[in-house]
Structure formats: structure tokens, C-alpha cells
Amino acid sequence: MISWVGIDISKSNLVVWVQPQKDGFEVPNTVEGFDVLVARLGQYTVGRVLLEATGGYERKVMAALQQASFSVLRINPRRARAFAVAMGKNAKTDPIDAAVLADFAEALHASREKPISPEREALRELI
């Protein structure tokens, strides 16, 4: 079974939701937290991890997940919010946001969205 992962990111922590298993957990937004995250996600066959652009707080976890061979896609927060509203999810908490992102990851499955390579991310940071 393919799993879809949404991660709500803040400066200090990552709130994670795995769909359809309905597995939610939280880890620190640190290198140690990334190790725990990769180990936990390694238990699933992950189709895609979806996260929002959060002013740079997402860069290190995105790189760690890509290095661990996960397909990661970063989207504009407005796009995620529009999806949540379209799905009738008006409440806004970190666990709800992570679950909405996991649902959106599944909905994007058939789209032509392409993950950003680490090389392209490095070029973005230079610009």
C-alpha cells in the first residue's frame, strides 16, 4: 500500500501525518529529528512527501528526505490552504494542516509536479 505524507513545519518542530494509515507524530526540526523522521517513514512505502515553503525552515528536512531517497515536493502555502478550504477543512492546527498536506500529496499523485533536485535547490539559494 502506498502512503502519502504531509509535514507541517515550524522553526522548532515537524508535525507529520501518514495517510491512509492515519499515523501522526511530531519530531524536532533538527538533524536528530530528521533521523527519527527518516526511520519512521522507512516503515512505509511512501509515494510522496508534501510540505509547504516556510521561509527556509523546510530546506534542511527537505534535503534530508531527498538524501534518503524520498520523493519530496514543496508547495506554496496559499495553494495548500486553497486545497484545505476546497476540502471543507476550515480549522487550522498543525495536525490538521499535516493531514491536509498528506491528502494533497495523494491528490497530486497523478499530476506532473516534479520534485526539486538538491542541485536546483542550491542554485535557488544562490539567487
Image (spheres, helix red, strand yellow):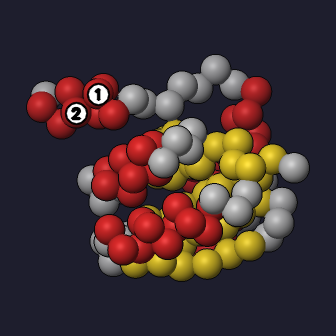
Give the camera-side residue of 121 and 41. 41
Kindly indicate the quadrant of the structure image that contains residue 47: top right
Do callouts 1 and 2 mark residues in contact (Cβ within 8 Å)? Answer: yes
Please tell me whether residue 47 is drawn above or below residue 15 in the rendered image: above
Please tell me whether residue 22 is drawn above or below residue 60 in the rendered image: below
Q: Position of residue 82 (x, y in %)?
A: 62, 47
Give the camera-side residue of 59 and 89. 59
Identity, as a three-letter code, of the amino acid under mark 1: Glu
Left or right placement of residue 44 versus residue 58 in this view: right
Q: Assign a secondary structure to mark 1.
A: helix
Q: Residue at x 75, y 44 (%)?
A: 106
Identity, as a three-letter code, of the amino acid under mark 2: Ala
- Whether residue 53 can be seen here: no
Give the camera-side residue of 123 and 78. 123
Give the camera-side residue of 92 and 65. 65
Left or right placement of residue 124 versus residue 13 in this view: left
Q: Residue at x 79, y 70 (%)?
A: 22
Q: Assign a secondary structure to mark 2.
A: helix
Q: Position of residue 71 (x, y in %)?
A: 57, 39
- Whether residue 95 can be seen here: yes
Q: Position of residue 120 (x, y in %)?
A: 30, 26
Q: How many marks?
A: 2
Left or right placement of residue 76 versus residue 120 in this view: right
Q: CA distance from mark 1 to mark 2?
A: 5 Å
Name the residue carrying label 2. 122
Instruction: Name the residue furthest right.
Output: 1
Name the residue carrying label 1. 119
